[in-house]
Image (cartoon, rainbow, N blue to C red):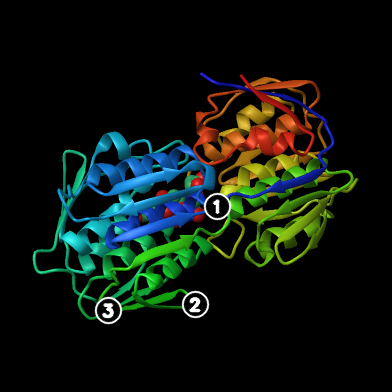
Amino acid sequence: MQKLIIKGKRELKGKISVSGSKNSTLPILAASILANEVCLKNIPLVKDIFTMVELLNFIGLKTKFNKKKNLVEIKNNEKNINTLAPYKLVKTMRAGVLVLGSLLTKYRVAKVSLPGGCAIGSRPVNLHLFALKKLGAKIKIKDGYIFAEAKKGLKGTIIRFPSISVGATENALLASINAKGRTILKNCAIEPEINDLIIFLKKLGASINLKGRTITISERKLKKTKIIHEVVFDRIELGTYMIAGALLAKNKMIINKINPKIVKTEIDLLKRTGVKIKKSKTSLTIKSSKNLKKINISTKPYPGFPTDLQAQFMVLMTQINGESKIREDIFENRFMHVPELRRMGAQIEIKNKTAIIRGPTKLTGAEVMATDLRASVSLVLAGLVAENRTIINRIYHLDRGYEFIEKKLKGCKAEIKRI
Ligand code: EPZ
């Protein structure tokens, strides 16, 4: 089992580049089932992406990685297509459930393992199935699998989501691509990753219009040509490094290959604490400051503050004067990093869905354990700011979503190594 060893309190300076978005690459890989040929660029070489590509291979698509260029080529020659997403692949990578919409709209039948829960919550897919049924799919749940079919194809309709869900919006969007007539999806998630999926689907010939939280899809024949697409940058990785800079960039740290407009909320919040941030068209310069000011935050669907940055922001709050609060409004169990941060000296109290963080506290290095992707990166941030040495176990959680994290942080003078 690999571990990360971090020697804390090193000043961060220099440049760091952000990789492509995991959460944009995953639905676009699922959408590749609808295409003939795809070249997907700027993909992050992380575990979840390898698992999703393995799922496409299992279904019968031909895939070829070019890891040096961070790209994957995908071909669907329609031979021996297996409309099955097996438990062994979906259990470790929940986003495997996104092939349901593509398989159903193209092959009119699909058997997809229920993704099951994970550390941060039960992660139901009822909203996904609600939308597919509205489009005319017959859905049956048996032996832990979703059996879906639409013998006469799916039929466009108006669907209003009772609550906002990224995955359900993506699955419904994919399913509507070959549906007859017009589909109107209301109360959709509008994360930048969904916008990236829409751009990809439009390259494929789909007719899609996004306005507010409404996505309108009109029936259109898809192209057979090769689709080339560069995946949008990972705004959560960016937010993570912005917080690292806010904690330790006494001079300045520059983060490249990004679009600051997409992370306006995060920039505004960090500026409110007193962190100095300068923007250019494709980069950010971060400079920490002495006495940061406390703030209260709640996690919200985009464009609100992202739940995927909650654990990371909490580490910053341990260094802020006074009592800061962060409320987790998206997932029911996303405070697993708190006991580990407490072991490093953080003063955090949980009241219902709100964490109350008293600062500034001196964090001291400890041996800690990662539990889920974003909790594990909050332990990296805590290790960077803590006295002495921090050892982080179970870093396979980290490798699911952060490409070359120790290499990138070493590039900014952090003392971090993997053993
Ligand atoms: C996506 O998960 C992301 N994953 C998550 O990132 C992210 O935290 C989440 O969106 C919220 O932004 C990918 O994009 C692969 P949701 P998703 O459906 O789609 C409830 C990471 O760290 N819900 O928007 O599963 C659900 O339980 C991951 O990269 C239902 O009740 O999130 C949650 O409370 C973690 N029924 C809320 O909605 C459903 O059918 C939002 O979930 C679906 C969701």
Q: Amino acid at mark 3?
A: Arg
Pointers 3 and 1 in contact (C-beta within 8 Å): no
Name the N-terminal-most of marks 3 and 1: 1
Residue plotted at (52% across, 41% down): 401
Q: Residues within 10 Å of mark 2 (few under 14, many from 20)?
A: few
Q: Is residue 287 left or right of residue 407?
A: right
Looking at the rendered structure, the kind of residue marked 2 is Gly
The spot of residue 17 in percent (x, y) is 67, 49
Measure how far apart labels 3 and 1 are at the Cα level: 29 Å
The C terminus - image quarter: top right
- Circle 3: element type: loop
Residue 299: % across, % down: 58, 55
Above or below, 367 against 386 in this view is above
* Of residues 70 and 288, the one drawn nearer to the viewer in this rendering: 70
SS at badge 1: loop
Q: CA distance from mark 2 to mark 1?
A: 25 Å
Residue that badge 2 annotates: 212
- Is residue 397 visible in the rendered image? The answer is yes
Direction from residue 62 to residue 399 in the image, left or right: right
Q: Nearer the viewer, mark 2 or mark 1?
A: 1
Mark 1: amino acid? Gly
Q: Earlier in the sequence, mark 2 or mark 1?
A: 1
Q: Quadrant of residue 31?
A: bottom left
Q: Which mark is residue 220?
A: 3
Please name which of the two marks, 2 or 3, marks the residue nearer to the observer.
3
Dot 1, how many residues are within 10 Å of its Cα: few (below 14), some (14-19), or many (20+)?
A: many
Mark 2 and mark 3 lie on one chain; the one further toward the N terminus is 2
Q: Residue at x 30, y 43 (%)?
A: 55
| Residue indicated by mark 1 | 20
Residue 369, percent across and down? 57, 24
